[in-house]
Image (tube, rainbow, N blue to C red):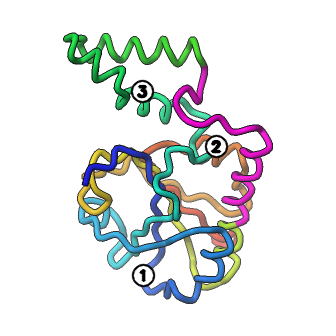
Amino acid sequence: MVNMCFYITATLPKGVVLEELDNIFNEYNMAFNPIENESILSQLRSGELYLRATKDYCDCDTVLGSSNNLQEYQNLLNSQKVRNLKKKKWTDEQIDQWIKEKLQREGSSTLRKKLTPKEKENETKRWLDFLRSLLNTKKISRIGLLKHWYDGALDTEKITLTRTEKIPLKTISPEFLLNLEEDVLYEFLPSYNF
């Protein structure tokens, strides 16, 4: 199955009992279903859990990382319009330039549903509250979030992490979540870890 969508995945430390966190997952409409993807598991700590974070069909409309143009760029790159340009023998450089010009002309959120400021605020608050609830349980020492554009299946996609960032809970802000980068593993930690 080919997905061609953004997905938010998560990591949790070895030994976390997911069933003990079900109330939090349900309260914030999260799935946290295990994924066996050797490509990403090989880049994590031994025994680390790798999970599909949300219950949504895909996460193309997520607020996470929505303030940077990477999401819109990726959506345009995989659009029917670009497939038509490739049939017309456009080069990768020409397509890249066309996408950049289109984004500059039209601004962000060209292909995805535009959220009202209130909807964006509510969704960002939901993610912040979820992270805080999870980290305040004292049952986990960290939670990682990863946003990736999938060209294939969740369990077979080849993913190379750009980097891992450790973020204390007290420094998490809506702006930070809105600017998450693709292929960066963000590990959120209880504030007492710093």
Q: Nearer the viewer, residue 102 or 13?
A: 102
Residue at 40% x, 45% y is: 5
Residue that badge 1 annotates: 14
Bounds of the magenta segment: 107-129
Q: Quadrant of residue 175?
A: top right
Label 2 – label 1 distance at C-alpha: 28 Å
Residue 82, position as x, y percentages in the image? 33, 21
Residue at 44% x, 53% y is: 7
The kind of residue on which mark 2 rests is Leu
Residue at 64% x, 43% y is: 178
Mark nearest the camera among 3 and 1 is 3
Q: Quadrant of residue 79?
A: top left
The kind of residue on which mark 1 rests is Lys
Of the 4 image quadrants, the one containing the C terminus is: bottom right
Any mark on residue 178, and which? 2
Label 3 – label 1 distance at C-alpha: 38 Å
Residue at disc 3, secondary structure:
helix
Residue that badge 3 annotates: 76
Q: Is residue 112 left or right of residue 83?
A: right
Q: Nearer the viewer, residue 86 or 21?
A: 86
Q: Is residue 16 magenta?
A: no
Mark nearest the camera among 2 and 1 is 2
Q: Quadrant of residue 129?
A: bottom right
Any mark on residue 120, and which? none
Label 2 – label 3 distance at C-alpha: 20 Å
